[in-house]
Amino acid sequence: MDNESRDINIEQGIDAYIKGDLSENEINELWIQLFKRPEYINQLETEIDLVRLYRAREEEYENNESSNFREQFQELKSGKEMVSWKWFMAMAAIAIILFVSIRLLTGNHKKSKWKQVKASAHVTLSKDLASAQVIRSAETISSADSLLNIGFKAALGGNSSKAMKIYRSMLNNFSEPQLRAKVHFNMGILQYKAGKYDDCIDNFKKAVPNLKHVNLIKERAYWYIGNAYLKQQEPVRARLAIYRAHKIGKIYAKEESILLKQLNHQLGIKKPDN
Amino acid sequence: MEYSELVDAIKQNDRSKADKLLRRLMPRLLAFLRIHLNANQQDAEDCAQQALLTSLEAIRDEKIRNKDRLFSFLLTCCKNNYLNMMNRRNVHIHGDISHNNNSKPRQLSSLMNKERRTLLEHCLEQLSRGYKTFIDYWFKYPDSDARAAASHFNISVNNAWTRKHRVINKLNDCYKKKSEY
């Protein structure tokens, strides 16, 4: 297929179809176009295979990493890497003496930053909460957007319980996936702020699958999941979430990079993420 | 396919010509059933065959009057045939196809055949470094879009689509050649 015979609408349609962005009517329309231009069916199949290949690679990479952690932890646990228990104790005693002596000599009493990686997320409600999209040309606002804004206003005014009530009622009354994702995300933010880490992780996880094209919110969701896991002292899970946030890397790239380095160090991961 | 040719053949009762013309549509229907509904080859063939027969009747009864309508009719028939087939077998299809908004190709959810994966990996290796980097970016960040790719590679959005199109064509050609061996 040369450039002249290309149909950019079909190409963009294929891309949107693969990402799940088309309604059933749009899918029918795309397939009618594909029936007229069957050479594009091959393109669609190749793209589907590419998505599956990249997904499979990513899953393998993550599985390998998880099994690497497990192996490293197992090795440490079973003591394979230690020459003997006595030797280990002797070496540890020397290390402690040296460490204490150096600290006394240098007067450096600061806590080691590698000891336990700490969460570094700070909620700023006005920045973090998702609100309704503002479209200048729109003359009216939908009831869902209006509720989202009322929830936003309540949360900002310090009335989190009212905001949560509004968000819960929205979940009961609206089925649009992206809107529900925003509601779950906002609930997660309020719960993170209130220190309810289990609940906030649950809500962020519900939000993520439907935030396909809302990368900024999606990155925030992963970022807060990671930080919530850190609060719960679950570094392996925290690392995976921060890694996912870092792959989007539009808001907290620097902070994510620092946390990843610290977590890699804490978990003994030699191969850093790019 | 010339729609008028098909209608003429049906009206003149030239069954073999009508069959021949409709059969040309068979691979497209099979692709729809496999990709959109994740049907296996045997089920897809049965459903597509049935859809073609139904459409033949509909053209004869003048219920279908143009090519677009024929394609739309065939899509609906294929979908209904497949859903009925699954219902008869008591197989639950994840997500209601008829009312499901934002549905992706269902083939995405199935595992990739090992042979296809090897072929595709080989074909990716054959790409020039520039193309490989580009397609890596596009598919490693599936939530990203053409604008993001354009800005990442410092090219226009149109160029991003063109580049993607070229890479997919190259992969297609390579795939085809390798599959023939």
Image: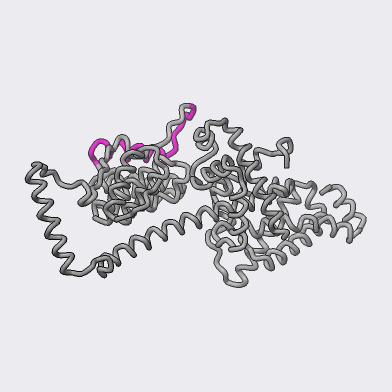
Residue B102, position as x, y percentages in the image: 54, 49
Residue A145 placement, left or right of B59: left
The C terminus of chain A, quarter of image: top left
Residue A120, position as x, y percentages in the image: 25, 43
Residue A63 occupies quadrant: bottom left
The N terminus of chain A, quarter of image: top right
- Work out which residue is located at the far left of the displayed protein and give it: A104
Asked if residue B173 is positioned above or below residue A148 in the image, the reply reads below
Residue B114, position as x, y percentages in the image: 58, 63
Asked if residue B63 is positioned above or below residue A252 in the image, the reply reads below
Residue A256 occupies quadrant: top left
Name the one closer to the observer, A165 or B53.
B53
Name the one closer to the observer, A113 or B6.
A113
Q: Which residues are magenta?
A: A137-159
Residue B105 placement, left or right of B144: right
Question: What secondary structure characterizes most of the magenta part?
Answer: helix
Asked if residue A123 is positioned above or below residue B30 in the image, the reply reads above
Residue B115 placement, left or right of A218: right
Residue at (18, 47) in percent of width and height: A112
Residue at (56, 56) in percent of width and height: B108
- Number of callouts in the render? 0
Q: Is residue A153 located in the magenta-colored stretch of the structure?
A: yes
Residue at (86, 47) in percent of width and height: B4
Name the one closer to the observer, A39 or B140.
B140
Residue B23, position as x, y percentages in the image: 80, 58
Residue A167 placement, left or right of B112: left
Q: Is residue B48 located in the magenta-colored stretch of the structure?
A: no
Name the one closer to the observer, A71 or A238.
A71
